[in-house]
Amino acid sequence: MTVSNMRAWIRRSLAPLHKLTSKIRSAGWLGKRASSPDNDKLSIAEPAEEAISVPSSNNHHPQPSNEPLPIPVQQPLGWMSRIRQYKTTIAKGVGAFGLVAAITVGGNYYVESNTLDLYDVYVLDKWIGTVNDPQIVEDFKIAKYKELEAKWQNVNMILNTDEVVLKQERAFKKPFDNEAALAELDRYLVPEAMGVQLKVNGEEVAIVKDRETAESILDDIMSQYTGESAAKASNQVSILSAEAQTEQEEAVLGVSKIREAEFMQEIDFVSLTVDPEEVAEPEEVKELLETGAVTPVTHTVVQGDCVGCIAHQYKIPVDVIYENNPWIVDDRIKEGDELNLTVLEPKLSVKTVEELVEQQEIHFETETITDDEMKVGETEVIQAGQNGQKLITFRLTKINGQLREEEIISEEITVEPVKAIIKKGTKVVGEGTGNFAWPVESANISSGYGMRWGRLHKGIDITSSKRDILAADHGKVKEAGYRYDYGNYVIIDHQNGYETLYGHLSQLDTEAGAIVEQGDKIGVMGSTGDSTGVHLHFEIINSGKVENPMKYLNR
């Protein structure tokens, strides 16, 4: 029974009492009007209820008389008369009123105490139960989310909680069942896994938890080569900190500065519904992007092995062996050593462009004055030479941290060299001057002198559109032949403590024992031996020790 229904029942119960009260008020008012002498227009009198007669004083029984009998006089009835007349009815009405009042008060209390705020639970307009507290439903949804998070920690699980609607109703003695409603709600809350598909050049690589996870993986890869995280824009990843620095910034000698950095492949993120089992761990995805998930290849060193021989056997670049096995120094390996020969096939590559400023010595020039009076081999120093200093700025292009191109941007002489003047005796054919010319015209340096992959790169690599190889100074050809590492090569002895080596030639135009002058053609640039492209490998050896050719060569 609702509150409105209860109130209607009470009104019906009080209706007889209202009618009785109205009747009493109406009768009293009419009696007054009938007895009033001032009211001549009203002739309404109350009905006779009793007659007043005069009995005999001597006899108890009435005697016949000739006198006419007295006429009964109708007396007006007041409120008290009316009350006496209706006292029984009034008593009954008062009793009924008290009963009804008691019923009303008790009924209202009963109704109010049994009238509750209840909440009907709907999922997509389908009623599934009634609860007495909306917080019960909210707590249930939170508990379901926590349950999913505990089970699928690396998966972005969602529930269709947005389809759940609660409708409030205030009702009398309406039944509810919290447990049944939640049990039914559990059937309608369907968990769904959402993931982000990581694509490289349009090819699916892996599915991860969310975009934030994917970007974190890319940041980790980028930071290995830049020290900075990757920034995201228009589904492409580039590095914010790789903007060109101002010219006023002071360069640190020997420390490269990153000018550009980017992923070489196009990267896309696609959000989609997935099977939770398909979501990969971040470390697994990172390894896949960096290595391509290739099968590892190893080699155990046996007697007679050398680094170049092993590279030739497996048909891989020598650089791979040095990169994968950084403990190798000066090609020293021994029987039983295990080498990692795995050639990685990364799905994602980071290209960086760096600038490096290095300080180099400028070897002084030597001016020779011949003196036919002096014996062969005798010299006299007229003026001692002094080396100068210069700053060379290189642009280094690297892919995944490995140098792919080296270019000289500028040279700045900071200390001018002082020329040496020497007087020499008899002229000896084939003796060098000590001043070296570039062995290639229009030369460009593709790789400089210094440590590379755990070993010393003993010279410089030179490229040019002009392929003729020229003698850097006068001398005598000491060797001209082929080696597995240098390919076709020439060594010139300059008869003054210096030697020069020319490697990877495609053609030899001289032979051992030949006397050459500075600028004579001795071969043609090529890519023989352990070479990754057409270039000249050029070394300067002073008294048996290699030196940086840039110390002797000037633009």
Image (spheres, grey):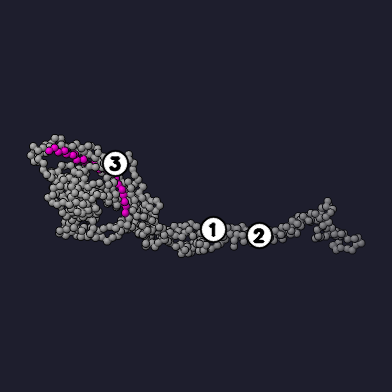
Mark 1–mark 2 Cα distance, whole angstroms, equals 29 Å
SS state under label 1: strand
**x 23%, y 59%: residue:** 315
Disc number lying in front (3 or 2) = 3
Mark linked to residue 11: 2
Callout 2, which amino acid? Arg
**Residue 251's disc number:** 3
Image location (x, y in percent) of residue 94: 68, 58
Q: Position of residue 527 (x, y in %)?
A: 22, 54
For mark 3, give the secondary structure. loop
User: Of residues 281 and 241, which is closer to you in this image?
Assistant: 241
Camera-side residue of 518 and 483: 518
Q: Which amino acid does the dot numbered 1 rest on?
A: Gln
Q: Dot 1: within a 10 Å radius of its alpha carbon, few (fewer than 14), some, or many (20 or more) residues? A: some
Characterize the local packing of mark 3: few (<14), some (14-19) or many (20 or more) Cα atoms within 10 angstroms: some
Nearer to us: label 1 or label 2? 1
What is the magenta range? 349-370
Residue at (27% x, 50% y) in the render: 405
Pointer 2: residues within 10 angstroms few (<14), some, or many (20+)? few
Q: Nearer the viewer, residue 130 or 230?
A: 230
The answer to whether residue 246 is left or right of residue 488 is right
Q: Position of residue 45 (x, y in %)?
A: 82, 57
Residue at the top extreme? 382
Give the Cα distance between marks 1 and 3.
72 Å
Residue 367 counted in the magenta span: yes
- Magenta span: chief secondary structure: strand
Can you identify the residue that label 1 sits on?
168
- Under tag 2, what secondary structure? helix
Residue 199 located left or right of residue 11: left
The correct choice, above or below, for 422 with respect to 196 in the image is above
Asked if labels 2 and 3 touch by Cβ distance under 8 angstroms, the answer is no
Numbered mark located on residue 219 in the image: none
